[in-house]
Image (cartoon, helix red, strand yellow):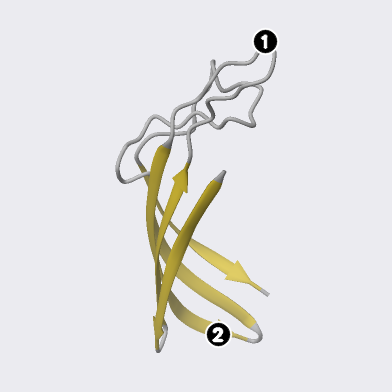
């Protein structure tokens, strides 16, 4: 079971969000499956709308993922024992939507 919350804030051309997800431990795994530990996943993102060009939005963004650097093994993944979810990471870039 997973649950969490997200807080979004927007003002003018800025949008920011903070997301916290709690994944409960899976202790009752099926036959030939392994149990998985619980985790907390904390992410933060912000974006700025640079311009609106003939119906196309141009945005600059920054995201930080798994800020707590948790070892996340998704209980629904067949690869959970071999490939955990990514650790702490960051992205910066731009997005064009039209």
Determine whether 49 is above or below 41 in the image: below
**3D distance between C-alphas at marks 1 and 2:** 54 Å
Badge 2 density bin: few <14, some 14–19, many ≥20, Cα 10 Å:
few
Q: Which mark is residue 52?
A: 2
In this rendering, would 28 be left or right of 87? right
Q: Is residue 64 visible?
A: no
Against 65, residue 14 (above or below) is below
The answer to whether one can see residue 21 in this image is yes
Looking at the image, which residue is at 54% across and 16% down?
81
Up/down of 68 relative to 82, above or below: below
| Residue drawn 46% across the image and 63% down it | 5
Provide residue 3's location: percent of width, then percent of height: 51, 53
* Residue drawn where x is 56% and y is 23% of the image: 80
Q: Residue furthest left?
A: 68
- The dot on residue 32 is 1
Residue at the limit of the structure toward the top, as seen here: 32
Is disc 1 placed on a helix, strand or loop?
A: loop
Residue 7 location in percent, x, y?
41, 70
Indicate left or right for 82 with 32 as reference.
Answer: left
């Amino acid at each position: 079971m997973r649950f969490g919350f997200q807080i979004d804030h927007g003002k003018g051309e800025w949008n920011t969000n903070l997301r916290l997800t709690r994944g409960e431990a899976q202790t009752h795994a099926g036959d030939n499956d392994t149990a998985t530990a619980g985790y907390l996943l904390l992410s933060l993102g912000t974006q700025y709308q640079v311009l609106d060009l003939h119906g196309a939005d141009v945005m600059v963004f920054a995201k930080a993922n798994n800020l707590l650097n948790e070892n996340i093994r998704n209980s629904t993944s067949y690869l959970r024992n071999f490939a955990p979810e990514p650790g702490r990471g960051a992205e910066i870039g731009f997005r064009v939507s039209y």
